[in-house]
Image: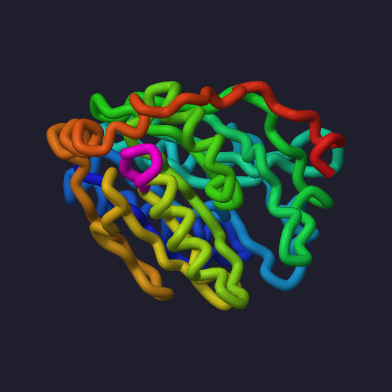
Amino acid sequence: MRIAVGQFASTEDWQTNLKTCMTLIDEAVEGGAGLLVLPEDSLALFIDEPERIAEAAQPLDGPFVTGLRAHTEGSRTTVVAGVHEPAGDGKVFNTLVAIRDGAIVAVYRKVHLYDAFGARESDRVTPGDGEPVVLDCAGWQVGLMTCYDVRFPEMARLLVDAGADVLAVPAAWVRGPAKERHWEVMVTARALENTCYVAASGECGRRNIGSSMVVDPLGIVRDRLADRPGLLWAIADRGELGEARRRLPVLANRRFRVDPSIRPVKESE
């Protein structure tokens, strides 16, 4: 399967961002991608006034997702993108939608909220509480994670236990001391410890690092972008995946299972 990862600097205007996404979709479809991963804040991003994200939030039948759906009609490329949708409590969900051939084929609402390094995503966002989401994509099983989720190895392991061969990780990784190193280590570790592919899309621009990448099952970065908009490509190969899991059978050798139950938010605060 050909994997494309798109990177751009999201604006406050959803229509501008939709046009950017459409351009990346066109490039991915033309290049024969089975999977295109776009950033976490593809709908809109308010760098200096994050509390305004509720203004821009749209339901999944709103014009942004509807526009993405219409633009994928007739294509077998699966597009994964991040949006914010109203949560019904004055907050929003930080949501990933997977779209193929004009239809939504999977929805994941971010479980781990970015309450770290002085940020408080939970002030504006309601966490999801559903089971891990894995979808079929051109015969491959793709698990969905969002940004801060990548710091939690049990999340990736649950997705792999559910059959994921590839982890799609849309993100908007905030700049800061050592933060780019954190991103590189976490994305690579999730691939290596689970012997799976990781396709990670980072929003770029003034606030976020970009640094989108695809990592293979033995932890090798196959392609990456720096801090400018662009599209990268990589190949997920079934033989390569099987050989990696034969040579490094960590999934077969492990002695502990991951508990799939979610702790209530109040217990983790």
Give coordinates of residue 240: x percent, y percent.
16, 39
Give coordinates of residue 221: x percent, y percent.
28, 59
Image-quadrant location for residue 71: top left
Give coordinates of residue 106: x percent, y percent.
48, 27
Which quadrant does the C terminus fall into?
A: top right
**Residue 11 vertical position relative to residue 240 in the rendered view, above or below:** below
Residue drawn at (43%, 55%) of the image: 201
Which quadrant does the N terminus fall into?
A: top left
Q: Is residue 103 visible?
A: no
Question: As drawn, which residue projects farthest toward the left?
Answer: 239
Tell whether position 168 is magenta.
no
Residue drawn at (42%, 28%) of the image: 254
Left or right side of 2 for 161 = right
Q: Nearer the viewer, residue 181 or 131?
A: 181
Residue drawn at (67%, 43%) of the image: 112
Q: Is residue 228 visible?
A: yes
**Residue 144 vertical position relative to residue 176 in the rendered view, above or below:** above
Left or right side of 67 for 242 = left
**Residue 66 vertical position relative to residue 54 in the rendered view, above or below:** above
The stretch of residues the image draws in magenta is 192-198
Residue drawn at (31%, 52%) of the image: 219
Q: Nearer the viewer, residue 103 or 122?
A: 122
**Residue 174 vertical position relative to residue 126 in the rendered view, above or below:** below
Left or right side of 229 for 243 = left
Give coordinates of residue 125: x percent, y percent.
76, 45
